[in-house]
Image (cartoon, helix red, strand yellow):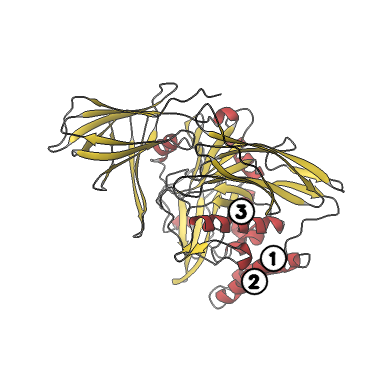
């Protein structure tokens, strides 16, 4: 149990150091408020003139990685520095600055206004930890990473992210092998785990196929990832079937990336996709930017939009609804989260997946837990849920009749919880009465103690949302629990499977005359699968 946190502390202390003419040298360091241990962290420094400033490490053993990303002309801006657990320096002209310090998801952020004069100053920040996930047996990962191997040790420690999967083999042209891909790093990557320390690791051999051109012609297909494979793939795409087969042989995991690329719904039945990004690389700390992207949602999903297109909540809900549709059609994809940090204006691990492990951290156990769905995805809250006293990913076998399942746990967050919802087959089965209890750590907790009756094969999941003063959508979502009832199979709703059938029909027509017959046959195969499922829909 964490002890009661003191208020976040940021001290400005006069010191003596030299800086460039017209600027004062600010020296600083960040500590854990309880233990006094120096912490790696992410820091934002912005002047009243809106200019951003990027500190450097003051230690020969330290490191600092400046990150500068902006999306278009919108306010989607990410300007920060990740710093190792050492002192840092930054030269600042006199004036007022807003300084924000964060460290992953398990610490309260600190934001303060600081006035810098003509004299040197020192900054000491004490971060209060509100939850210790490793102590509870949960370890985090980001499965869509575009940071370099040189950067990742610094950035993972600053974000307290346990596992990363940099997509160092990356191709955007149809038929081109990833080994010579136009976005490939050029490094010869070995399928060997890179250990930063005992609980922070990098698995470096991962591949992204993100196809925008076919035979030199602009024709977007979309993206998928192969994670945790053991050799460099020599196959280009399309078609995709041989890549899927090779991934399975090598113990790889296939990740869908975004659900509404043109080819996404073909990939699921044809490749046997493993992972679905419930938090994808369009979900940012900064302002939501991709208001118009990809294939439009069907009407039955009731996705929120405004004059610009998707709202942030609408985009997230679109992903949820597409995931639920696939689950209802029998595709048991496991949830994950990826940021594409390195490309987009988002910190590494802003959306992350936590995997439950027994007996401490081990990479092989972590990847097995991810594949088994023993997980939850979050952009802020923590969600600890059991059904009949077992965790997410479990499959219950029911002989018949009606059985009552107990759903218990807690949702916790640095902000009050706004909603906690229990889903059965994608529909709201129970709304938990939210009673935000203030914990000694300063965070909020909502108890979950509900039950639902199951008479036919089903899946159950829990999701929650923060109640934030800025109105942003921050959520957590468990992996599904599956219930198999003898003689009562899970069947999709007619609107759901009609959407998948129509999507395949549209894509077959779109790709005729552009893709070869072997590739078109994969779309036809997906259509056949969906049409078969449609015969049992209700």
Label of residue 305 in the image: none
Q: Position of residue 495 (x, y in %)?
A: 69, 66
**On screen, 83 above or below 496?**
above
Q: Which residue is mark 2?
A: 502
From the image, state whether disc 1 or disc 3 is nearer to you.
1
Horizontally, is 222 left or right of 365 in the view?
left
Asked if residue 177 can be seen in this view, the reply is: no
Label 1: how many Cα within 10 Å (few below 14, some 14–19, many 20+): many
Q: Secondary structure at mark 2?
A: helix
From the image, state whether disc 3 or disc 2 is nearer to you.
2
Q: Nearer the viewer, residue 14 or 85?
A: 14
Label of residue 246 in the image: 3
For image coordinates 83% across by 55% down, the residue present is 488
Horizontally, is 441 left or right of 359 in the view?
left
Label of residue 497 in the image: 1
Horizontally, is 375 left or right of 211 in the view?
right
Estimate the spatial distance between the alpha carbons at disc 3 and disc 2, rounded to whole Å.
29 Å
């Amino acid at each position: 149990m964490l002890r009661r946190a003191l208020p976040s502390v940021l001290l400005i202390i006069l010191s003596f150091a030299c800086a460039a003419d017209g600027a004062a040298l600010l020296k600083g360091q960040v500590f854990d408020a309880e233990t006094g241990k120096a912490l790696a962290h992410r820091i934002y420094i912005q002047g009243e003139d809106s200019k951003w400033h990027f500190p450097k490490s003051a230690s020969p053993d330290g490191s600092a990685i400046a990150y500068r990303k902006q999306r278009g002309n919108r306010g989607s801006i990410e300007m920060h520095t990740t710093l190792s657990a050492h002192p840092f320096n930054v030269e600042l002209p006199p004036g007022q600055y807003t300084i924000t310090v964060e460290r992953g998801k398990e610490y309260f952020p600190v934001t303060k206004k600081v006035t810098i004069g003509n004299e040197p100053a020192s900054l000491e920040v004490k971060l209060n930890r509100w939850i210790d996930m490793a102590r509870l047996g949960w370890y985090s990962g980001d499965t869509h990473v575009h940071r370099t191997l040189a950067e990742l040790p610094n950035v993972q420690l600053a974000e307290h992210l346990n596992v990363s999967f940099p997509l160092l083999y990356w191709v955007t042209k149809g038929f081109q092998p990833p080994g010579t891909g136009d976005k490939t790093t050029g490094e010869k990557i070995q399928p060997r785990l890179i250990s930063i320390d005992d609980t922070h690791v990098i698995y470096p051999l991962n591949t992204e196929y993100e196809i925008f051109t076919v035979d030199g012609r602009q024709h977007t297909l979309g993206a998928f990832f192969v994670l945790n494979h053991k050799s460099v793939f020599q196959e280009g795409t399309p078609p995709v079937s041989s890549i899927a087969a090779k991934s399975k042989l090598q113990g790889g995991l296939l990740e869908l990336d975004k659900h509404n690329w043109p080819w996404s719904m073909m990939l699921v039945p044809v490749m046997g996709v493993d992972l679905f990004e419930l938090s994808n690389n369009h979900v940012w700390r900064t302002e939501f930017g991709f208001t118009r992207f990809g294939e439009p949602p069907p009407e039955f999903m009731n996705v929120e939009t405004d004059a610009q297109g998707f709202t942030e909540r609408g985009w997230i809900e679109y992903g949820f609804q597409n995931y639920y549709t696939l689950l209802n059609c029998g595709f048991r994809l496991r949830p994950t989260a990826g940021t594409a940090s390195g490309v987009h204006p988002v910190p590494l691990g802003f959306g992350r997946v936590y995997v439950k492990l027994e007996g401490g951290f081990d990479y092989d156990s972590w990847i097995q837990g991810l594949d088994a769905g023993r997980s939850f995805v979050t952009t802020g809250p923590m969600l600890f849920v059991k059904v009949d006293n077992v965790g997410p990913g479990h499959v219950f076998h029911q002989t018949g009749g009606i059985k009552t399942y107990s759903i218990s746990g807690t949702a916790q967050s640095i902000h009050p919880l706004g909603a906690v919802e229990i889903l059965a087959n994608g529909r709201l089965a129970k709304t938990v009465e939210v009673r935000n209890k203030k914990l000694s750590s300063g965070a909020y907790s909502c108890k979950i103690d509900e039950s639902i009756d199951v008479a036919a094969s089903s899946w159950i999941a829990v999701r929650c949302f923060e109640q934030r003063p800025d109105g942003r959508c921050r959520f957590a979502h468990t992996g599904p629990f599956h219930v198999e009832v003898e003689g009562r199979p899970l069947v999709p709703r007619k609107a759901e499977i009609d959407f998948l059938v129509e999507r395949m029909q549209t894509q077959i027509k779109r790709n005729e005359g552009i893709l070869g017959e072997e590739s078109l046959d994969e779309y036809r195969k997906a259509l056949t699968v969906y049409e078969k499922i449609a015969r049992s829909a209700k």
